[in-house]
Image (cartoon, grey):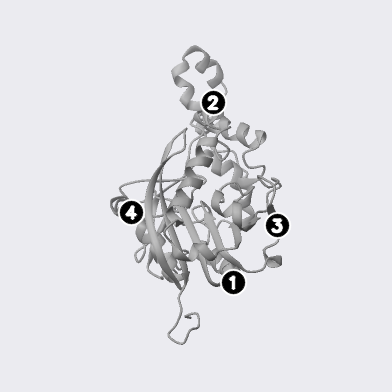
Amino acid sequence: MPCPNCASPDVVARAGGLLQPFFVKRVFGIEPPTLASLLPKGIGGGIARLIGAVPVLSRLVEARPLQCEILVCTACDFVCPALAIAETQLLNLYRDYRSQSYNAERVRFEQSYRKIASLVGKSPAEHRARTQHVQAFLSDVPEMSTVREVLDFAGADGRFIPPGLLERCNCTVYDVSEEPPYRSGIRKAAELAELGAFDYIQVCHLLEHVRQPKELMESILPHLAQGGLVYLEVPMEGSQERVERLRAGTEEFPIHEHINLYSKKTLAALVQALGLRAVKMGTAELDLGFCRVTILSAVATVRVAPGGKAAA
């Protein structure tokens, strides 16, 4: 298969993918294995009593990741699972997303998630850090002054639209969730085909979650008005050194909510593959209150050919 990020045919499959237990349970609906489950039934039956006597043996009942191959793109360094995961299966991961039932099931497999379950996506510190970053990043882009129609694609309740745009623009959030808009004045839409054209579209922290990022962006860009801007934001989880280790098979790639690995090279390649011109790209480290993250940002516009039409 070609690279889902840049469409290059130069992809290689390598061992090294680790499907995390929560991912396995949610996406495929199967109970991940434990060391105890791999033991003969006669031995496995006494595990509970054994653990009661020797607590350190509790690792025998911890869910284990499943191995899979990964794809590594030679052209753009994109990394993703080499699995045929249906979109309906992947959507299972986001069923009742961030709700009590979601959090309870995730904590079952990841005890450490209990500490941040109520903060992820909802923390005032995260909200402030992310919106301030986007607003500052766009502040020196002259074309932003003419933006009037804003689309936050897959933005849940729209809370991560920069405040400067909320104050002066017509803001729409497209999302299939049932979360109501974060504040009055934000329009919520669930059907992309019903939307018109927008001067500014932001796609934040989505591309690392989907099977076909280039294909997804190609479904969004018809809604970008002539001369409009698209803002992309992803976590920067790939360095040249890490990609080389994954390519060589000397490092494993944990697959959880983030199924794709992005680096500067990868995001730049996506922008180019979409026929866009990068206006600005950069990285930033954000303090979300419960953790620190490094993110990649890009703002781009459709390339214009010498005759004044969008380049093919």
Quarter of the figure with residue 48: top right
Image mark for residue 190: 3
| Distance between mark 1 and mark 2 Cα atoms | 57 Å
Q: How far apart are marks 2 and 4 (CA)?
A: 39 Å
Q: Which of marks 4 and 1 is nearer the N terminus?
A: 1
* Tag 1 residue: 222
Q: Name the residue under label 2.
A: 44
Q: Please give the label number shown on residue 290.
A: none
Viewer-proximal residue among 124 and 122: 124
Badge 4 is on which residue? 243
Residue drawn at point x = 34 percent, y = 64 percent: 74
The disc, 3 or 4, on the residue closer to the chain's N-terminal end is 3
Regarding mark 1 in the picture, which secondary structure is present there?
Answer: helix
User: Of tags 2 and 3, which is closer to the observer?
Assistant: 3
Q: For the residue marked with disc 1, what is the amino acid?
A: Pro
| Position in image of residue 271 (x %, y %) | 44, 66
